Image (tube, helix red, strand yellow):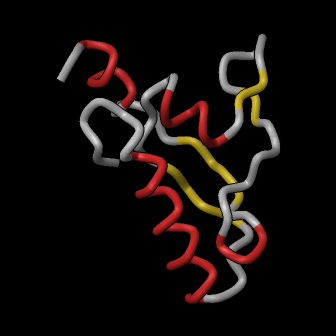
Amino acid sequence: MTLEEKAGQLFIKQIPAGINGTIDNTTTVLDGTRNLTTALLITEKLLSHFNVINARSAKQMAEWHNAIQDLALQTRLKIL
């Protein structure tokens, strides 16, 4: 792991699960200066720990988790 990837492991961010298990593309403030989507938190800021809110069912949560794992394949380590 690079230093940046290790630093990303130190953060836990609250993010919403999207409708029907999709990745929510609304923005969230991470550093107080810029809004980032869930996808950017994973691919650019290298975060991998999240408290997920708004999941209404186990099926929705499983579908969201699968979508997040697909997104993780775009990162260097391909894991989340």
Quarter that holds the N terminus? top left
The percent coordinates of residue 26 (x first, y second) are 82, 44
Rendered view: 72 above or below 61: above
Rendering quarter of residue 51: bottom right
Position of 3 with respect to 63 (left or right) is: left
Comparing 55 with 79, the one in front is 79
Comparing 3 with 19, the one in front is 19
The residue shown at (67%, 17%) is 31
The percent coordinates of residue 55 (x first, y second) are 68, 75
Rendered view: 53 above or below 58: above
The residue shown at (78%, 25%) is 35
Rendering quarter of residue 13: top right
The residue shown at (49%, 31%) is 43
Rendered view: 62 above or below 47: below
Position of 68 with respect to 6 (left or right) is: right
Farthest residue in the left direction? 1
The residue shown at (60%, 31%) is 40
The percent coordinates of residue 73 (x first, y second) are 36, 46
Position of 16 with respect to 67 (left or right) is: right
Rendered view: 44 above or below 24: above
